[in-house]
Amino acid sequence: MSSAVKSTKVKSASAKPSDASNVKADKSPKAQAAANARPDGTTNADAPHAVIIGPVMRKKELIDAVVERSGVKKKDAKPVVEAMLEILGEALADNRELNLLPMGKFKVVNEKDLGNGKMMRVKVRQVTPTDKPKDADAATDETDI
């Protein structure tokens, strides 16, 4: 179980950014939109945009949502959800790519070992669902099951 660990460079406290465009977290959405504006005045729709972070979902809330949506009893859903989270955590720890549609595709970009665990940066790609399948065979494909 060997894994390639990418190291990240840490900037020193005295290092100054060469320009203000490197500090995107401090910009307001209007300032980011202005920075993404093209010379003709239109904005680039593909450019990254600010995301407003919602409330944190904890394991208890996840279990309650699974119970509500599936209709199973809480005593039956809890061990299944806990086992699933454990398996997903182990897969990410092994640097495995996860393809869990409709939730998305997860890929570990880099990791750093800490004293009490490890910190991982994970890239998540979530595909927007379409109304029509590409062909009839794609709708019945069981390779992800």
Image (cartoon, rainbow, N blue to C red):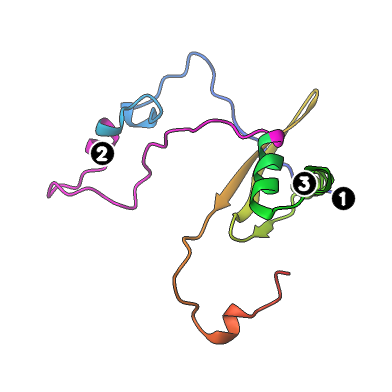
133 in the magenta segment: no
Frontmost of labels 3 and 2 is 3
Between 119 and 134, the one nearer to me in the picture:
134
| Figure quadrant of residue 136 | bottom right
| Figure quadrant of residue 131 | bottom left
What is the x, y in percent for residue 60? 71, 34
Q: Amino acid at mark 2?
A: Ala
- Tell me if mark 1 has few (under 14), some (14-19) or many (20+) residues whose alpha carbon lies within 10 angstroms of its own: few
33 in the magenta segment: yes
Disc marking residue 1: 1
Residue at the disc numbered 2: 33
Residue numbers of the magenta segment: 31-60
Q: Secondary structure at mark 3?
A: helix
Q: Which of pointers 1 and 2 lies earlier in the amino acid sequence?
A: 1
- Tell me if mark 2 has few (under 14), some (14-19) or many (20+) residues whose alpha carbon lies within 10 angstroms of its own: some
Residue at the disc numbered 3: 81
Q: Which of pointers 3 and 2 lies earlier in the amino acid sequence?
A: 2
